[in-house]
Amino acid sequence: MYARSVKGRELTFSVSGMLWNRSLVMLDQETRSLWSHILGEAMDGDLKGERLESIASTMMDWKSWKEAHPKTTVMALGRTSKEYRLEFQKKPNTFVLGLVHDGDTIAYPFDLLAKRQVVNDVAGRVAVVVTFDSASTAGQIFSRAVDGKALTFKAGEQGRMTDAQTGSVWHAVRGACESGELKGKQLEPIPANISYRKTWATFHPDGRTFGED
């Protein structure tokens, strides 16, 4: 997900009908520049070289989202969501949660995340925690810093995790502390993209894959 303002100008995007490295190319109506949806970067046109600001988001099943956000609105993408869910269930190893942050590029394979649920890592100079909930297929990345100190997390039960420093219990998808010494604290989400593993490697050939270091 991206913010669609560039240099104070709000852009309107559509599908260009073109592909680059077998991936979707977007077109902005205002300048007719062409954008990579994987990189969020204008590859051709007046805005070539400009990048869209990434916004943290979560990709998960409707039931889990509705329970967490009962007053939510929705844009129905039935065909897309159905195909993704079926393919993920059959071949989770074909997907990664991709991170570009603080000069580092990392791919977290879904099959590894499904087994571990919670991964502590460092992106550049930033301590991060990667969480995954198999029930909703939601993957999320947060900064591990709370009040200036980096916490270390481990997986708990029913989509929860605990930090080693205080034993507080956190919601693994929302990043909110629900009980313990740090109750009420909120981890800062870091934008990440769910991508096909091969596609991510094509666009980020110099990145690393967690678990294959």
Image (tube, grey):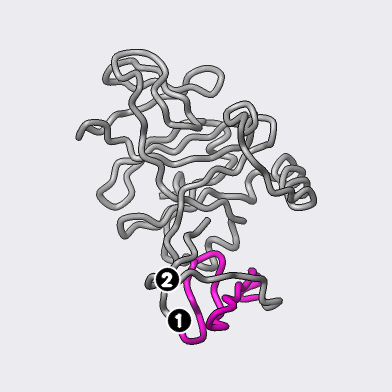
Q: Residue at x 57, y 51 (%)?
A: 194
Report the number of numbered marks.
2
Q: Is residue 108 left or right of residue 22?
A: left
Q: Position of residue 193 (x, y in %)?
A: 52, 53
Residue beneath disc 2:
6
Up the image or down, 192 lies above or below 47; here it is: above
Q: Residue furthest top?
A: 180
**Spatial separation of the CA atoms under disc 2 and disc 1:** 9 Å
Amino acid carrying label 2: it is Val
Q: Is residue 209 left or right of residue 184?
A: right
Q: Which mark is residue 117?
A: none
Circle 1 Cα neighbour tier, 10 Å, few/some/many (<14 / 14–19 / ≥20) = some
For label 1, the SS is: loop
Up the image or down, 168 lies above or below 35; here it is: above
Q: Residue at x 63, y 26 (%)?
A: 67
Q: Is residue 44 magenta?
A: yes
| Mark before the other along the chain sequence, 2 or 1 | 2
Circle 2 Cα neighbour tier, 10 Å, few/some/many (<14 / 14–19 / ≥20) = few
Residue beneath disc 1:
47
Asked where in the image residue 169 lies, by quadrant, the reply is top left
Mark 2 vs mark 1: give the one in front: 2
Q: Position of residue 166 (x, y in %)?
A: 28, 17
Q: Residue at x 33, y 49 (%)?
A: 123
Q: Which residue occupies the foreground of this view, 100 or 50?
A: 50
User: What segment carries the magenta color?
Assistant: 19-47
Q: Is residue 110 magenta?
A: no
Amino acid carrying label 1: it is Leu
Q: Is residue 88 left or right of residue 183?
A: right
For label 2, the SS is: strand
Whether label 2 touches label 1, CB < 8 Å: yes
